[in-house]
Image: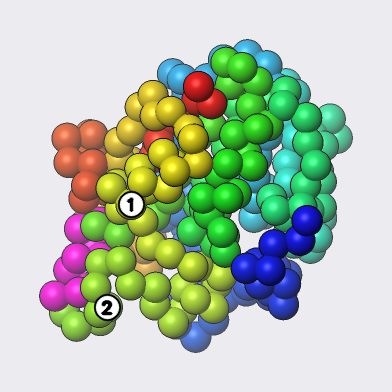
Amino acid sequence: MKNSSIDCSRDHNQEYQDNDARQYAYDFDYVVRRYMMRTLSPFFAKGKALELGCFEGETTKLYTEHFDDLSVIEAADSLIEVAKRKVAPTVRFIHSTIETAELEPIYDAIFLVHTLEHLDQPVQALARIRQWLSPTGRLFVVVPNANAASRQIAVKMGLIDTNAAVTAGELAHGHRCTYSLDTLEHAVRQAGLQIQARGGVFFKPFANFQFDQLLQHKIIDQAYLDGCYALGMQYPDLSASIYMVCGRD
């Protein structure tokens, strides 16, 4: 049955375009995702994997290093064409939204990375994804962190109203919510998922565009990045992204 609360007017091929307020992706995003893989990989098990939302396929490539059987759901067909060129033809792409995809409960690892914040009905979507997990499968949920140090600084500067605000630039990119650890946990539990692990990835003192500039001009180096990653484990609430590893039971 069609959910009337879902915005059917959304143009997924348009939402990922850069706008005047912000870029959709920064070089720093790929730095964080490599650290994200380091954080999550100890929880991986062999089997079938599913990625929900692939953007241009950079993270898809990282998953293929761990999983031989990978499927991808992506709502923007133009992004599928980009991502396909970056991975082996054995990766299966499905042009669909999470709300309309029909899948069997066979997946041992499902990745919902920087996607939950885009969904109109996040709890209902999480409950739907739960049904796709195998009995021992794990769902990896990762979202940008409302309480990241850089975001709290932006609030003190008057650039953002509150930590959890959705800015105009984020709204244009399809964001519907900005999560903190407590609100993410609430959504996950409402969906009937069991939390097996949680935390933060990469302490974030600067905005994404500032990190890009610092890296470009070699003001910070790999040692600094590694230090931020280590500090993020100590202070997850101030990290760039927060995560939860979930099981269906």
Q: From the viewer's perspective, tell me whether residue 189 is left or right of residue 94.
A: left
- The spot of residue 226 in percent (x, y) is 27, 37
The foreground one among 114 and 107 is: 107
In space, the residues marked 1 and 2 are separated at their CA atoms by 19 Å
The residue under the point 39% across, 29% down is 195
Q: Which residue lies furthest to the right in this view?
A: 89
Q: Which of marks 1 and 2 is in front?
A: 1
The foreground one among 205 and 242 is: 242
Instruction: Name the residue beneath numbered marker 1.
Output: 183
> What is the magenta range?
148-156
Can residue 227 be seen here?
Answer: no
* Residue 27 position (above or below residue 197): below
Residue 104, picture quadrant: top right
Q: Residue furthest bottom?
A: 20
Q: Which residue lies furthest to the front in this view?
A: 1
Q: Classify mark 2: helix, strand or loop.
A: loop
The foreground one among 28 and 63 is: 63
- The spot of residue 164 in percent (x, y) is 30, 66
The residue under the point 68% across, 16% down is 47
* Residue 178 position (above or below residue 111): below
* Residue 65 position (above or below residue 36): above
Q: From the viewer's perspective, tell me whether residue 155 is left or right of residue 86.
A: left
Instruction: Name the residue beneath numbered marker 2.
Output: 160
